[in-house]
Image (tube, rainbow, N blue to C red):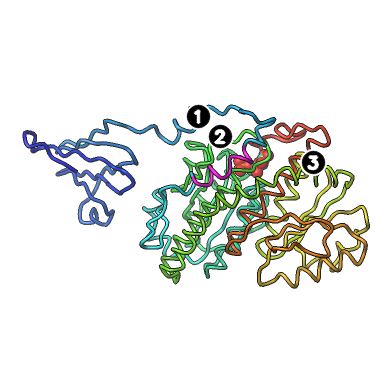
């Protein structure tokens, strides 16, 4: 902030990645970098100076002169041309390294091992006292909710996931102090909005993790985080999913740092998140081989996608992608559950895509693969195990990362596999039959 010698009654403020907040009451205008500074003053009006914004402050108030294009303007003015890609889905899959970087850009205070999430800062104090988090969404966003619940629990924070269309009719039990996090790419999904309306009656904190700025869920929630994935035109969500996972990790670390997580752990996760775009790039370089595998496996009409722990989420998302755009029957299932029923379907022309990274439960997964191979089932494995998985018929290798970040990487081969399978069957991956990008009725 600066002051011109000849205009001592005005301050000029410019913001580049910092925090500048203005507050006004009947007597004065205050500028501060910490919301706590306003407590002694009965503030009537408040304004956070956004990134790349400049303001002139006087006793009458403030004027924002160079208003950066709002996220909304940025989002809607962005040209989404298909470039050299065949379909938007392909473009959006290959955009993920850039989009992921964009989602996390400028959102860390590394020295504190802390994400900076402007959208929810005002609720930081309340969120510190929340004992239970509920994640609510539909389709791919519901799979992101499942990931969030697993990650929060991993960080010692109680959380669970809800399918939005089930919530209002399943007599959910929750505490008035619980917080709800609504995940939605479009921000317009009717089933999710129905739950927001219900929770607003109950008075719980409602947060949003949304892609489309200014959308209904963006507006209706108390606070939220934009995932910055840009326009997603393919009906089957891809880049929005990996950006949702990135945003969930940042939210989880933010809340865990308020609780027991140390600076070191926070910094380790931030460092690893920053390596993810390059690791996605490495997987995308293997696209031609995954295309060959889709050609080879196009003869199968029934699929299981299987994984344990975090990868039961990737399994569900992988099976959803194959269903959505290639119309092949595919079911996601926790790998350890196979012997309790689903194994009955296994026969040579039933393919199992097993997501099995080299993590603490790897050996258990290998036993399950032997159970499938023991019934002459076909196994396509996705792993970061260097030499691949010997009992599997084929293996797709991915780079290694922290186990709870690995779903961000294991998702990519399942997106490509589904996309190339759709092309094998001559389907239009951008406009799959019977589906819409946003379902605004329920
Ligand atoms: C479906 C889309 O209509 O809605 C899916 O086809 C999506 O891709 C689901 O995951 C939920 O949409 P949203 O916009 O709330 O994330």
- Name the element at disc 2: loop
Q: Does the magenta stretch include residue 171?
A: no
User: What is the residue that sits farthest to the left in this orientation?
Assistant: 6
Image position, residue 93 (x, y; %)? 64, 41
Q: Nearer the viewer, residue 312 or 199?
A: 312
In the image: residue 7, left or right of residue 435? left
Q: Mark 3 points at which residue?
A: 421
Residue 139, percent from left and from top = 67, 46
Q: Position of residue 398 (x, y in %)?
A: 67, 56
| Residue that label 1 marks | 78
Mark 2 Cα shell of 10 Å, populated few (<14), some (14-19), many (≥20): some
The answer to whether one can see residue 304 in this image is yes
Please tell me whether residue 29 is drawn above or below residue 361 in the rendered image. above
Mark 2 touches mark 3? (CB < 8 Å): no
Q: Disc 2 vs disc 1: Cβ atoms closer than 8 Å?
A: yes
Does residue 98 belong to the magenta stretch? yes
Label 2 vs 3, first from the N-terminus:
2
Image quarter of residue 188: top right
Q: Which image quarter: residue 85?
A: top right
Give above or below for 428 relative to 129: above
Q: Residue at x 75, y 34 (%)?
A: 432
- Alpha carbon separation for disc pair 2 and 1: 8 Å
Magenta residue span: 92-101
**Counting other residues with Cα less than 10 Å from the Cα at mark 1, is it few (<14), some (14-19), or many (20 or more)?**
few
Q: Indicate which quadrant contains ligand 1.
A: top right
């Amino acid at each position: 902030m600066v002051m011109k010698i000849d205009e001592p009654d005005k301050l000029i403020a410019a913001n580049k990645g910092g925090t500048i907040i203005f507050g006004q009451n009947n007597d004065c205008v205050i500028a501060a970098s910490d919301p706590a500074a306003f407590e002694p003053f009965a503030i009537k009006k408040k304004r956070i100076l956004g990134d790349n914004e400049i303001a002139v402050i006087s006793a009458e108030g403030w004027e924002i002169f160079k208003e950066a294009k709002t996220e909304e303007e940025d989002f809607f003015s962005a040209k989404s041309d298909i470039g050299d890609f065949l379909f938007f889905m392909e473009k959006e899959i290959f955009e993920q390294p850039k989009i992921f970087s964009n989602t996390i850009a400028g959102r860390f205070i590394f020295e504190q091992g802390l994400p900076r999430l402007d959208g929810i800062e005002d609720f930081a104090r309340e969120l510190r006292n929340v004992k239970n988090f509920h994640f609510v969404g539909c389709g791919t966003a519901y799979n992101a909710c499942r990931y969030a619940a697993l990650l929060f629990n991993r960080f010692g924070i109680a959380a669970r996931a809800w399918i939005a269309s089930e919530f209002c009719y399943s007599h959910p039990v929750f505490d008035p102090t619980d917080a709800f996090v609504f995940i939605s790419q479009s921000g317009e999904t009717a089933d999710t909005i129905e739950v927001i309306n219900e929770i607003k009656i109950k008075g719980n904190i409602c947060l949003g993790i949304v892609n489309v700025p200014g959308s209904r869920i963006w507006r209706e929630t108390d606070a939220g985080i934009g995932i910055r994935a840009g326009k997603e035109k393919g009906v089957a969500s891809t880049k929005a999913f990996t950006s949702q996972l990135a945003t969930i990790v940042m939210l989880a670390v933010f809340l865990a740092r308020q609780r027991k997580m140390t600076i070191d752990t926070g910094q380790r996760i931030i460092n690893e998140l920053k390596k993810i775009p390059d690791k996605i790039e490495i997987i995308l370089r293997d696209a031609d081989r995954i295309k060959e595998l889709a050609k080879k496996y196009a003869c199968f009409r029934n699929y299981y996608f299987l994984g344990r722990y975090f990868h039961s989420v990737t399994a569900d998302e992988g099976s959803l992608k194959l269903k959505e755009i290639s119309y092949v029957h595919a079911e996601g299932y926790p790998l350890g559950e196979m012997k309790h029923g689903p194994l009955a379907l296994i026969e040579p022309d039933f393919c199992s895509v097993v997501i099995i990274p080299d993590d603490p439960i790897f050996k258990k997964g290998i036993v399950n693969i032997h159970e499938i191979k023991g019934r002459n089932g076909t196994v396509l494995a996705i792993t970061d195990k260097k030499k691949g998985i010997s009992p599997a018929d084929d293996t797709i290798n991915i780079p290694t990362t922290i186990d709870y970040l690995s779903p961000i990487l294991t998702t990519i081969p399942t997106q490509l596999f589904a996309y190339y399978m759709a092309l094998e069957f001559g389907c239009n991956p951008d406009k799959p039959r019977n589906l819409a990008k946003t379902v605004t009725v329920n």
